[in-house]
Image (spheres, grey):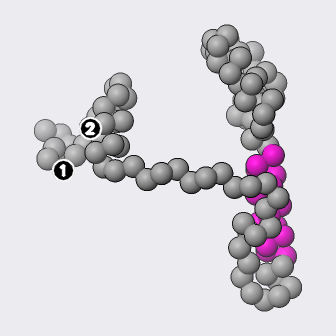
Amino acid sequence: MMQLAREFRRPDWRRMLSEMSATELGEWAVHFSLNSFSDALLDAEFATLKALVTGLVTGAAQDADDFRLLSASEPAPEKTDDELMRLGEGITGGVRYGPDSEPGH
């Protein structure tokens, strides 16, 4: 639980724990046993640092992805406007703005 609170930068881990269900806590435990947010973040930071130093030495711009140790995750597929509108319909309390509706009407 302390690791999860640290990943989300929440000093109030007891409150965070009280707001979670047992199922959520179990799912996070499984997730952290497989991978950690910190690993990907550190890899990205060091890859960027290596690319900057190499760029300073060579004088040519470098791509930070060339210096990553961990494999990058696959990009999320692009969603169409219709799919995004359908997904947005499920958000409670949201206000829907579209091409045929004007704010304030």
- Quarter of the image holding residue 92? top left
Write down the residue under mark 1: 99
Label 2 sits on what residue type? Answer: Arg
Q: Is residue 83 above or below residue 73?
A: above
Write down the residue under mark 2: 96
Label 1 sits on what residue type? Answer: Pro
User: Which residues make up the magenta segment?
Assistant: 39-53
Identify the residue at the far bottom of this view.
59
Q: Residue at x 71, y 24 (%)?
A: 28
Q: Is residue 61 above or below residue 36?
A: below
Residue 15 appears in the figure: no
Residue 57, position in %: x, y?
Answer: 86, 85
Q: Secondary structure at mark 2?
A: loop
Q: Residue at x 75, y 41 (%)?
A: 37
Task: Indicate whether residue 76 is drawn in magenta.
Answer: no
Residue 79 appears in the figure: yes
